[in-house]
Amino acid sequence: MRVQLVDPSAYTPPYDHGLAGGLARAGADVELVTSRYPWDEPPSANGFRVTESFYRLAMRRDLPQPARRALKLAEHVPDMLAYRRRARRADVCHYQWLPLEALDSLLLPRGRPRVFTLHNVRRRGDGRATLAVTRKLARQMDALVVHSRDAAGQLRERFGADATRIHHIPHGALDYLTRLPARDVPSVEGPVVLWFGTVRGYKGVDTLLEAFRAVRGAELWIVGKPEIPMQPLHELARAVPGRVRFVERFVPDPELASYLRRADLVALPYRSIDQSGVLASALAFGKPIVMTAVGGFAEVAEDHGAARLVPPDDPAALAAALDELLADQAARRALADAAARAASGPYSWDRIGRQTLDLYESLL
């Protein structure tokens, strides 16, 4: 079976490569159609082809962001029209992201099964335009993939999607990170609690800093590129009795892997989420995780025992969970073991590749 995975903007190369590898090992002939990823080296392509046919000018590494956005807009329609010709080579086209969904719904090729993964249904807005575009795409696609039961419910209830077209296939553990060479990270004697990812408001860094006022004997590391003003977070950090380290930049994969290896706990205090590559990375390293009971996060903890859950926006509950786990090595070990089992089992790319290939075969 000839499969094209399509991520025009290279928005999630780790996910794309994980799924492509799983599909290839399951027997599919896989082509990942994408663009150059200008910020880091993507994972290696083992068993599948990568075609960087989108945004050849816009995704050069030396471009400032305003110029990149302008060039992407200029290149988008010609590149999507060119992709229509490439799609004739595929038996199934599986879209991971569509940069301009309203326009792309008119440009997508026809004549073969089309699958669309909605990576974060909860983060889709409730505006009239968003509702209309999502409903249109849900009708156009032969199958819709989501990463949690919660997302499937959201897609049915908010967007009116046909339940028979919705397929729950998990987000795989990003285990390629575990094979990267070590990099130097700060040397610390005591335990480390790690938060990492792009810093955005819905990810609850402020709640974590408030909680850390009551946590003793540990350092907090906040690692990732900011997309919100950081001054309010620094002011919260000054009230924390222990040390808070900020790494406020894009962190390449080998460095991220080293931060994960050093962490004793990973904290994910999100306010709203479906699933997350951050969680998938922590699972791959078998790390004990404390996270909020929102969206698909709750399912990872409830189904597999792979995390400790706390309510969102509750610094006291978060502090209590962190304190308890920092003081209880056996409890941390139990969570870590459960995370490792989940990563090698239901969240393994081999299992996910087989599930996805079964979906394609049912469409054909």
Image: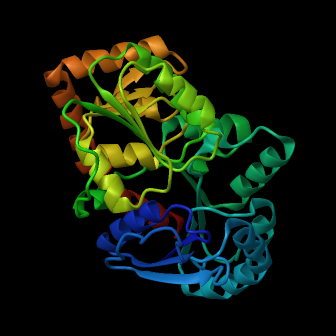
> Left or right of 302: which side holds 64?
right
Residue 2 visible within the image = no
> Left or right of 254: which side holds 128?
right
The x and y percentages for residue 298 are 44, 29
From the viewer's perspective, is residue 263 above or below residue 281?
Answer: above
The one nearer the camera, 171 or 357, is: 171
The quarter in which the N terminus is drawn is bottom left
| Residue furthest to the left | 330
From the viewer's perspective, is residue 193 above or below residue 239?
Answer: below
Quadrant hosting residue 324 = top left
The x and y percentages for residue 62 are 60, 77
Q: How many marks?
A: 0
Residue 27 visible within the image = yes
The one nearer the camera, 130 or 155, is: 130
Quadrant hosting residue 357 = bottom left
From the viewer's perspective, is residue 338 above or below residue 247?
Answer: above
> Left or right of 61: which side holds 216?
left
> Left or right of 152: which side holds 79?
right
| Residue furthest to the front | 238
The x and y percentages for residue 295 are 53, 32
Quadrant hosting residue 196 = top left
